[in-house]
Amino acid sequence: MKNVMIVATNTFREAVRDRVLYNLVFFALLMMAAAILVGQISIDIEKSVIISLGLTAISVIGLFIAIFIGVGLVSKEMDKRTLYALLAKPLPRWKFLLGKYFGLLMTLTVNTAAMALGLYAALWVVKHPLVRADGFVLVAVYLILLKLGLIVALAMLFSCFTTPFLAILFTAGIYVSGVYAGDLRVMRVVQMDPGMLKLLRIVSYALPNFENFNVMGAVAHDRGVPGILVGNATLYAIVYGAIVLAIAAVVFSRRNLK
Amino acid sequence: MKSRALQGIALGVLIVLGMAEVWNLQRKIDAEKQSLQLESEELMLRSGSMVTRMSLEYAPLMAAIYWTRAVQYFGEKHHLQDQDLQLLWPLLDITTTLDPNLLPAYRTGSSFLSDAPPRGAGEPDLAVKLLERGIKANPEQWRLYQDLGNVYYFDKKDYLKASQAFQQGSELPGALIWMKAMAARIAAEGESLETSYFLWKQVYDGAKEPELKKNAGSHLRMLQVELDFRAINHLADEYEKQTGHRASKMSELVQAGLISGVPVDPDGYPYVLGEGGKAELNLDSPLLEEQVMQKK
Amino acid sequence: MCFLEHWGGVCVDAGGRVLKNRDMANPAIEIENLTKEYPYGFLNLKKRLSLEGLTLQVEDGEVFGFLGPNGAGKSTTIKCLMRLIFPTKGTARILGKSIEDVSMHQDIGYLPEQPYFYDYLTATELLDYFAQFHGLTANDRKARIEKMLKKVGLESTKKIQLRKYSKGMLQRVGLAQAILHDPKVVVLDEPMSGLDPLGRREVRDIILELKREGRTVLFSTHILSDAEMLCDRVGVIVGGKLRGVGAPGELVGIQSQGMEVLFELGPEGKRPALLSRATQTGERYRVELKEEELYAALDELKLAGARILSVTQIKATLEEFFMGLVEADRAQAAAVEVRGK
């Protein structure tokens, strides 16, 4: 496992030296501007709007990083052949993969945490002092991070067997489908033949249900999130992520590099 | 390469077990989310014109998305027997602003809006507003006049306006003949069971949208029950006249030769005679529930 | 048909082992029947054999050169050894451990062809990163990196990010990361490619030093003179098949092919009969003679007053041996095609 951490640390270092961090500055400025603007326009709902806006931004920016960099983690190395010398070390391929994953996860955590700070700063500007209920925002951020972790795993899986472009497309596609997966289950409207309905149900469970990680509605209105939901969502992300990474590891271990 | 095969098997097992756990967790999460009503009741943007501007050239697509959302919103609330439908109007408003020609939005939407709770939102005025917008954008669509007339007749009980709506609609190309007849009849009689039944039947026959059809069908059944009640009560009165006492069982009416067999309700359950010898629904009939809901 | 007999060289058995060679006690690298198929074409139904039944052994402590034209399969073989690609058939062992055993990589150093490394790292950081996988302590790493950078001549640029490195410099970093952890076996894929003559000289020196330190070196190249100079033994691969293994000298045959005489005509302009067999470049003439004809020819030239510039033994070079193989291979392929039609 030590080797996994070595790869992870290096991946983190790469991200740091990449332009990835600039988005933090951009985000912080965005949040400040939004805070000031919102303060001028509306009454009473500034807080909820800031939280919604902030969480949306964290989610979207995180999504971009997770998909684009997640895909690049493996395919960039294969393309540029930086991988070759590394695999000649006593480092099994699956450990390499895992290391890359954790490296990006670390990057995302730091990113997200920094953005959360920016969000809190904006909140403070708009409505200080901060209340205990504002702690719920952290729960929402944590769940977003879980979601991003799952997306990175998916991005890596796809990048292990298709071109980077297709991998990005597939990952984005799964993300969109995953967001609506829950709706597939509650669709009562359209009359369909039962076989089709059953199939749709199965698909709706098989897809990663990203709505599990969305508590924006509650948090924006100062409502708490029950611990058991957070616990189950965490378990969900871990189990699903583990499956995806395991498949990725097997696929990658058998792949002939060019 | 034996290790490869083993690896494959191990992976397969992991996937199967893992997805089973995923399914299990998902069900728990679904329950937790629902029971705590964490569904976002928020519509971030309530202004139709704003959404239209933001949609660039994709307004019709956005309209379809919003319409789907409206339908799902309605369906979900219905399923949960939640009567709070406050987002319905904004959703319909945005949909029709994005695409003023989206007929199903007007037709089914006005039906959802206008129907009294627990079936609908109980907002006939908003339904009128919606339909008037629809008529303005689609002046050749006589069905919208039909819907407008229905709203005035059933939910606003304004028979004059209802009659006018049917009249105006009857003059449009493609309008069925009954529109004119209805206009006259409502102007003369106001509300009657037969009229109500007829109007809903027209909606049912002419509706392309499945939700609209379903709703009409539901109304029709209840009206059928009312009509049947009237007929049965009429016979019961006959029986009383003949025998001097009130019948307490349907079989008595049959024995008296007033009716050839025990009539059944639209779901197939035989009617019974209840308090005061008046027709009532069989206790087993699922229509009883609907009747109770309607009476609320 | 055994190509090598034509050249007066040694013949190999079906296993690619030179028949005269002794059986090795401790082969550092053993390759057995290595085959690699590449499916191609519509629905991947056709298969191309980039490696066919390769069998050879590299002895402990020897410098072994893989020779062959581009696309012959040298890189494919090396990548199979390093488990970058997976052979369709066959096995291999390095230092007694199967190539499927990842721990075996502790004792191997590898330089990929046209190496490219993480360009956001400096040379020091890269070497440090790679060294960590070998379980070296921080101090140990530091010391070795210093030594290595000096050895490959990158000391002055060690703090510069690799994105700014020239090709030659990258090659040197690659070499450094391959030998930093004191591997017993060093595998180099085209180590000379892209280097200027000075760079090539430096790499040659490093390889010789590795040999002096008792390491086994396997490298691939298509530059024959390098192979002649450095290798104890050479394996020639053409068209995915091993065509011959042996010491460079053995392969080309120890027999002399004849003598070459260079001369100029004398001041009196007398023309010896030899001129009919000679080729002329400017004032010089060149003639090829069999050994037994030499003295008679020299007498003739002396009589004619010609000035003798040089007398040298003609030896087949590795290049000619090589070209012969390639030509024969092409001819055979063409023959197969004709037959097939």
Image (cartoon, rainbow, N blue to C red):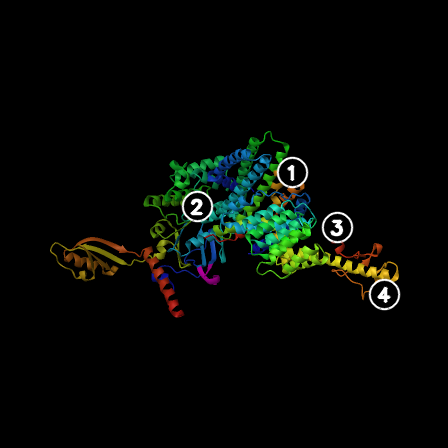
**Of B216 and B72, the residue lying toward us:** B216
Q: Amino acid at mark 4?
A: Gln
Q: Is residue A58 magenta?
A: no
Residue at which label 2 appears: C215
Residue at which label 3 appears: B295
Task: Report the residue at 49% width, 47% height from top.
Answer: B56
Task: Report the residue at 37% width, 48% height from top.
Answer: C192
Q: Residues within 10 Å of mark 1 (few under 14, many from 20)?
A: some
Residue at which label 1 appears: A223
Q: Which mark is residue C218?
A: none
Sequence order check, earlier mark of 3 and 4: 4
Task: Report the residue at 55% width, 31% height from top.
Answer: A125
Chain to which mark 4 belongs: B
How far is disc 4 from disc 2 in space, using C-alphas?
114 Å
Chain to which mark 3 belongs: B
Q: Please provide the residue range marked out in magenta.
A: C37-49
Secondary structure state at the residue bearing disc 4: helix
Q: Amino acid at mark 3?
A: Lys
Residue at which label 4 appears: B255
Q: Are marks 3 and 4 on the same chain?
A: yes
Q: Is residue B162 above or below residue C337?
A: above
The percent coordinates of residue C314 (x first, y second) are 28, 56
Q: Is residue C47 magenta?
A: yes
The nearer-to-camera label among 4 and 1 is: 4
Q: Amino acid at mark 1?
A: Arg
Secondary structure state at the residue bearing disc 2: loop
How far is disc 3 from disc 1 in space, using C-alphas?
36 Å
